[in-house]
């Protein structure tokens, strides 16, 4: 039977790497808090923001400050002088909210005198966080409260997060690990990673995914062979429509077929699957969208390999078989049933 089908989706680009949090080896300032709070509001104009959930001990904020001219040889006294003259630095708790903010008092004309001010927070795990930086990285780990965060050019690192998560970056990478629930993360540039649509698992199945920004398809034949077709170029920035088409060779069950991958109407990869599984893939692993649960179809990634962008729609089209193909499929079905009956 001809298994000619189509997958179309729109994927909002995400990425996969996260850089170093700060250049300073030691915090310029550390402030601990015994008073309770349920949320944070963190803002800086060029530095990084890191928030880690804790279950014991006092909450604390570490402030890291370096020069913006690429030379980190400023003394603590010089940093303090520039802070006093050019910045408003606030680390405090007010109205049940922890505030950490660094804002310039007025526009600084000499960029070589500006400072990179980064915040590293350790807060109760259920804390809700509202984070904003104009160009730094944002990292969140071990949190369960609502999370909202944005950076205009930095990377996003999200690990072990549950709850409502809303994040965006205008051109940075996204690293999403071991997180669940209501997650929406967007970026307008960089490399996407993760599974788009997968069926079954380690001992037979197929997966359409993105690796290092490149659309990729793997057919796993009985866990013995993996046939992979991949694009050579990464997805473009912004929304993209990925079309995957598989055309069965015919000639009976278990034969191969041709694979074609297109992005925004342009073919980016083509290849041939030498053989397919004649009947079913698995009795206990179904299909997944946006991740691969159970066991991994492909050895190219580790489960769950969540998609780091945003999937707007997945559409699967099964084209009807011709009369000849239907006859061929029915013949194969009867032969299989006869063999099964004979073996019993």
Image (cartoon, rainbow, N blue to C red):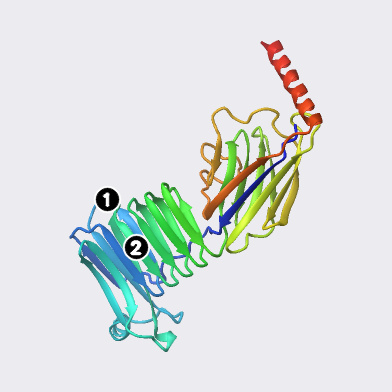
Viewer-side residue, 10 vs 154: 10
Viewer-side residue, 111 vs 311: 311
Above or below — where is 156 with respect to 106?
above
Judge whether residue 273 can be spotted in this image. Answer: no
Q: Earlier in the sequence, mark 1 or mark 2?
A: 1
Crowdedness near tag 1: few (<14), some (14–19) or many (≥20) residues, C-alpha within 10 Å: few
Q: Position of residue 234 (x, y in %)?
A: 64, 60
Crowdedness near tag 2: few (<14), some (14–19) or many (≥20) residues, C-alpha within 10 Å: some
Above or below — where is 67 with respect to 149?
below
Name the residue: 37% across, 69% down. Answer: 25
Q: Which numbered circle lies on residue 244? A: none
Name the residue: 71% across, 56% down. Answer: 268
Res. 253 image quadrant: top right
Query: Which residue is identified by label 1?
Result: 55
Res. 197 image quadrant: top right
Q: Which numbered circle lies on residue 130? A: 2
What element does badge 2 sit on? strand
Question: Which residue reaches farthest bottom?
Answer: 109
In-image side of 153 versus 24 (left or right): right
Q: Quadrant of the N terminus?
A: top right
Q: Position of residue 85 (x, y in %)?
A: 30, 86
Q: Quadrant of the C terminus?
A: top right
């Amino acid at each position: 039977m001809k298994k000619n089908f189509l997958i179309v989706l729109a994927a909002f680009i995400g990425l996969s790497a996260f850089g170093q949090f700060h250049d300073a080896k030691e915090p310029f300032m550390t402030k601990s808090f015994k008073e309770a709070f349920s949320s944070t509001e963190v803002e800086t104009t060029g530095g990084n923001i890191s928030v880690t959930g804790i279950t014991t001990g006092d909450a604390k904020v570490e402030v890291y400050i370096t020069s913006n001219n690429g030379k980190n040889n400023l003394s603590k006294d010089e940093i303090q002088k520039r802070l006093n003259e050019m910045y408003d630095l606030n680390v405090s708790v007010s109205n049940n909210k922890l505030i950490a903010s660094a804002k310039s008092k007025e526009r600084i004309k000499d960029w070589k005198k500006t400072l990179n001010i980064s915040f590293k927070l350790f807060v109760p795990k259920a804390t809700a966080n509202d984070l904003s930086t104009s160009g730094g990285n944002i990292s969140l780990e071990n949190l369960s409260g609502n999370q909202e965060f944005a950076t205009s050019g930095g990377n996003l690192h999200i690990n072990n997060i549950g709850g409502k998560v809303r994040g965006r970056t205008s051109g940075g990478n996204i690293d999403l690990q071991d997180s669940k629930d209501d997650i929406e993360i967007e970026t307008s540039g960089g490399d996407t990673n993760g599974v788009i649509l997968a069926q079954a698992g380690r001992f037979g199945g197929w997966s359409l995914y993105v690796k290092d920004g490149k659309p990729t398809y793997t057919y796993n034949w009985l866990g013995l062979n993996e046939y992979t077709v991949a694009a050579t170029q990464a997805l473009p920035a912004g929304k993209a429509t990925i079309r995957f088409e598989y055309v069965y060779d015919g000639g009976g069950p278990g034969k191969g077929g041709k694979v074609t991958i297109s992005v925004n109407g342009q073919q980016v990869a083509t290849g041939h699957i030498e053989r397919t599984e004649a009947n079913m893939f698995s009795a206990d692993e179904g299909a997944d969208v946006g991740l691969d649960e159970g066991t991994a179809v492909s050895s190219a990634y580790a489960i769950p390999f969540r998609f780091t962008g945003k999937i707007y729609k997945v559409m699967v089209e099964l084209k009807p078989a011709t009369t000849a193909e239907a006859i061929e499929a029915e013949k194969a079905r009867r032969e299989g049933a006869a063999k099964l009956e004979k073996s019993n």
